[in-house]
């Protein structure tokens, strides 16, 4: 698995439980590398919705994903109980850099860690737009 | 959505919480019809694992799915909190008929209900085999 | 696997190639039962789009799935090349009953067969609506 | 979308067609960021299988994914026809660094580009192992 330093539980600002599914395991009996990105999408958007900063069907601006990445430190497998951890590393005029960790429930070190960059655009024109103030406020609450 | 009678919460023997994910919503902003089957797979196998009746990597016999079906009564959407409900409708020599319901957390009527038929086979030969006694015992606990 | 009679290749009106993906195989090294429904969704909607009967983002009416089902006859596995086969079994005022087959490329008998029922609704109100004439025309081309 | 330089079609050694599926589009009507990683997994493993360098169920050594990443340049949507492009950037003793591009069929510039790092391990012990010669030969055919 990946080597090198990793962020620990204490480095994150927001946590949420993640359930695994039968379909998360691939033919090698572990959570497939692709599925971690589905966790990232879920953790980020769930946070924004809970904070009132995103309404999937009605928000005037939406976040398009322009870059993602993940390093995998140890295998996970359905039916493991997991936790997603989130922090905001950088807030730009129209972009947000998130950093995420996926932990076995209760573990100190991550099973994987990733990054996820949103650029906010107008829903109709898909042109970049400044982050709306309620979104910016939600991001600042979990910014490093 | 589907019409006709449906099973209610009180008709089921086993319940488990289900988290939705960002990817569950399709372009029409609701949980896609395919995803319910992923819930079914998860609810059934999670029950069997918790009961000690299935070890994904080591059990000598495994359940192959031979028939599935679902009727959809009302839309769901990420980030809804859901519950999966399970009962065993019929236990054969090598087969099991499960019935499932997907409920919004706390709702009395189902958002969807389905069926799921497993035939148990030898892992290596993939020939049908009698249900092992520990599996049969786990099934009888939730049989109608 | 499922027993009983099945429709053959000659029973269908429309065919389309289907590529498998790494993620289609589950821990038992075969295409997971859930994935067939993803094939069904794709075959139906691809046909409607190609016929000019559906514009995902702009059509005034959209098809909601109210019932699906599948019987599985033989295992498939990535990287198998497959074919999806489609016919329309019944056209109602606002509903369509599709029947589908999934074949190994070139095979006469199906690996799986399914059904898929759409009810058409107004995109905004989500109330049932009559099938628009261009959609009805596309369906009649492949109706039994 | 992502800015900065990108690899072009001529930078890749191996190409394969990719079909999109209904489920690839997310609620914003474009192929979801997660799905590109499913394309990567498919392109890499399909190449290895076609070259005789991987047997999913029987190979003594298997590739575990330790790092992945993707930059997204332009949106894609079902039912677009795509191409996956692959090259090997680095071959280590037990690791392989792949670089990938996802193109609209026939386009010169990529819709997305990614990287994908495999470490090869013994299937049973999951300890790193040297790349077997047939695998190494397959990799060298598409190495930069």
Image: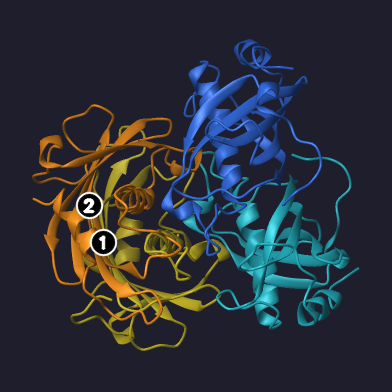
Chain colours: A orange, B blue, C cyan, D yellow
Please tell me whether residue B80 is drawn above or below residue B129 in the rendered image: below
Disc 1 is attached to a residue of which chain?
A
A31 with respect to A83 (left or right): right
Q: How many marks?
A: 2
- Element under label 2? strand
User: Residue sitting at 49 percent across and 66 percent down?
Assistant: D25
**Residue at which label 2 appears:** A114
Q: Visible in this render: residue B126? A: no
Residue, disc 1:
A68
Most foreground residue, C25 or B110: B110
Instruction: Residue B98: give x, y in percent of width and height.
Output: 70, 28
Please rate how many residues cluster around mark 1, counting C-alpha atoms within 10 Å: few if below 14, some from 14 to 19, many from 20. Answer: many
Give the CA distance from mark 2 to mark 1. Answer: 7 Å
Which badge, 2 or 1, is on the more N-terminal residue? 1
Q: Quadrant of the C terminus of chain B?
A: top right
Q: Write the residue at 47% across / 77% down.
A: D82
Callout 2 touching callout 1 (CB < 8 Å): yes
Q: Is residue D81 toward the left or the right of residue A100 in the image?
A: right
Label 1 element class: strand
- In the rendered image, the residue lying farthest to the right is C144
């Amino acid at each position: 698995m990946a080597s090198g330093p990793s962020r620990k539980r204490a480095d994150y600002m927001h946590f949420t439980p993640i359930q695994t599914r039968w379909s998360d395991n691939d033919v090698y009996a572990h959570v497939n590398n692709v599925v971690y990105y589905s966790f990232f999408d879920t953790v980020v958007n769930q946070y924004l919705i809970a904070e009132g900063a995103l309404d999937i069907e009605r928000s005037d601006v939406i976040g398009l994903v322009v870059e993602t990445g993940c390093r995998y430190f140890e295998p996970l497998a359905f039916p493991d109980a997991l936790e997603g951890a989130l922090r905001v590393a950088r807030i730009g005029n129209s972009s947000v850099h998130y950093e995420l960790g996926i932990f076995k429930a209760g573990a100190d070190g991550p099973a994987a860690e990733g990054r996820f960059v949103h650029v906010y655009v107008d829903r109709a024109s898909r042109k970049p737009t400044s982050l709306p103030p309620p979104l910016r406020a939600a991001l600042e609450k979990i910014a490093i």
